[in-house]
C-alpha cells in the first residue's frame, strides 16, 4: 500500500497535469453562493486562470458543462478530488439558546468522466441538492436530526448523503446500481477527517421492486438528483422510491437540465409514471408538506423558487439557465396524503 505522502504526491502530480488541460479552456468561475442567512465567506474573485478554476472547483461552485460523446462533462470533473464546503446549523444544547453554525469541508474523490462513468464525479445537480438541504435546515435545524432513516438513490460520490449525515440523520444509506460508484462513495465516507456522527453506509441497489424490496418501507426520506434524464428508467426509479419509502415518508428530488433536454417535460413525464405507481407531488401549504412553510408570505415559495432565490450566485444563474433550468419536487404516497386529508 502507498503511504499518505506517496498518495499526496500522486494527487499533486495529477492536478498539475489537469492544470495544463484546464488552462486551455475559456471559463469565468462563479462566485461562492449564499444560502439563506448562513453568511458564507466570500473567496477571492476567480479569473480566467487555472487558479481561479481550481478555486471554483474547491468552493463547491457550479461550473458550465460541455457535451461529449454519450455524456456531458465539466472542467472540475478532470480533478481527482473536489472539496465542497458546507455550513450546518447545530441546535443549541441549552434550553432557549440560539442555534450555532458549524463549518465543514467535505473531501470527495472522483474517478473519471465520459460515458459509463457518470456516477463517479460531482455534478451540478448534486451541489444544488446539498444547497437546498442546507437552506431547509436553516429554516428548521431539528428536522433532519429527527430523521431515523434516509436513502439516497443514485448517490454518485456520496456528497448529499454525507451532508445529511453531518446534519444529524440517524442512519443514511447511499445507494447506486454501479458497484464502482458504491465503492467510491464508501471510500469517501471513510476518508472524512471528522467522521459523521450517525451511521452512514453505501450499498449497491438497482432500481425496481425486486431489488428494492429488501429495504421495503425503511426510509423517512428518500433523496436524489438528476435521475430522470432517461425515460426508459422512469418506472424502475418510481418503483424503487415507492418501495423503500415509509408510509408517511417523503421523496426530495432535484433535477437540473442538460443542453438538448427539456427539464420540465422530463420531470412531468416521470411524475406521471410515479402517480401511476401510487405517489403524488405535494406543495408548500399542503397538509402533509414535510418542511417549514414561509410564514412571511401568503403563498409559500416552491422549492424550485427557493433554489433560484437563495441557492445561486448571480454568476451561476446563467449556467443553470443554459441547461434549461432546475426543478425540485417533493413526493409522498397517495394513501398517506388521503388519510391525512380525512382527519
Image (spheres, helix red, strand yellow):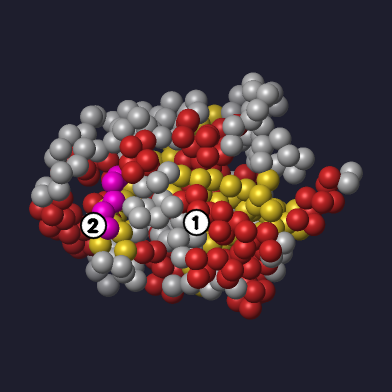
* Residue 109, position as x, y percentages in the image: 33, 58
Query: Residue at position x 33%, y 47% from top?
Result: 83
Give residue 78's mark.
Answer: 2
Q: Is residue 118 above or below residue 334?
A: below
Query: Residue at position x 68%, y 45% from top?
Result: 282
* Residue 95, position as x, y percentages in the image: 70, 26
- Range of magenta residues: 60-67
- Figure quadrant of the C terminus: top right
Query: In 3D space, how far apart are the residues under numbered discs 1 and 2 (Cα atoms)?
Result: 28 Å
Query: Residue at position x 50%, y 66% from top?
Result: 231
The answer to whether residue 151 is visible is yes
Classify residue 86 as left or right of residue 272. left
Bin the neighbour count of mark 1 within 10 Å (Cα to Cα): few under 14, some 14-19, many 20 and up: some
Query: Residue at position x 30%, y 67% from top?
Result: 70
Q: Label 2, secondary structure: give it.
A: helix
Q: Label 1, secondary structure: give it.
A: helix
- Within the image, what quadrant is residue 214 found in? bottom right
Question: Of label 1 and label 2, which has the lower sequence position?
Answer: 2
* Residue 24, position as x, y percentages in the image: 10, 49
The residue carrying mark 1 is 266
Amino acid at each position: 500500500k502507498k503511504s499518505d505522502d506517496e498518495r499526496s504526491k500522486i494527487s499533486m502530480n495529477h492536478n498539475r497535469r489537469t492544470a495544463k488541460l484546464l488552462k486551455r479552456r475559456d471559463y469565468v468561475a462563479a462566485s461562492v453562493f449564499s444560502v439563506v442567512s448562513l453568511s458564507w465567506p466570500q473567496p477571492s474573485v476567480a479569473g480566467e486562470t487555472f487558479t481561479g478554476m481550481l478555486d471554483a472547483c474547491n468552493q463547491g461552485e457550479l461550473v458550465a458543462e460541455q457535451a461529449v460523446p454519450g455524456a456531458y462533462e465539466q472542467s472540475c470533473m478532470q480533478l481527482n478530488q473536489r472539496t465542497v464546503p458546507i455550513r450546518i446549523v447545530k441546535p443549541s444544547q441549552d434550553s432557549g439558546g440560539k442555534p450555532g453554525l458549524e463549518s465543514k469541508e467535505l473531501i470527495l474523490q472522483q474517478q473519471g468522466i465520459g460515458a459509463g462513468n457518470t456516477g463517479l464525479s460531482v455534478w451540478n445537480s448534486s451541489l444544488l441538492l446539498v444547497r437546498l438541504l442546507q437552506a431547509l435546515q436553516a429554516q428548521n435545524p431539528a428536522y433532519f436530526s429527527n430523521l431515523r432513516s434516509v436513502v439516497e438513490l443514485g448517490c454518485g460520490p456520496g456528497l448529499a448523503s454525507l451532508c445529511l449525515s453531518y446534519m444529524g440523520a440517524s442512519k443514511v444509506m447511499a445507494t447506486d446500481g454501479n458497484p464502482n460508484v458504491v465503492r467510491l462513495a464508501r471510500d469517501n465516507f471513510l476518508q472524512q477527517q471528522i467522521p459523521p456522527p450517525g451511521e452512514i453506509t453505501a450499498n449497491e441497489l438497482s432500481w425496481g421492486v425486486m431489488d428494492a424490496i429488501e429495504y421495503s418501507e425503511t426510509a423517512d426520506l428518500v433523496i436524489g438528483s438528476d435521475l430522470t434524464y432517461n425515460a426508459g428508467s422512469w418506472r424502475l426509479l418510481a418503483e424503487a422510491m415507492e418501495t423503500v419509502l415509509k408510509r408517511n415518508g417523503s421523496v426530495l428530488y432535484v433535477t437540473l437540465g442538460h443542453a438538448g433536454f427539456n427539464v420540465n417535460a422530463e420531470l412531468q413525464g416521470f411524475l406521471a409514471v410515479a402517480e401511476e405507481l401510487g405517489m403524488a407531488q405535494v406543495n408548500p401549504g399542503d397538509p402533509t408538506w414535510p418542511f417549514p412553510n414561509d410564514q412571511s408570505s401568503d403563498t409559500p415559495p416552491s422549492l424550485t423558487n427557493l433554489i433560484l432565490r437563495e441557492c445561486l450566485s448571480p454568476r451561476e444563474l446563467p449556467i443553470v439557465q443554459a441547461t434549461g433550468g432546475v426543478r425540485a419536487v417533493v413526493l409522498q404516497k397517495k394513501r398517506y396524503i388521503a388519510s391525512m386529508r380525512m382527519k
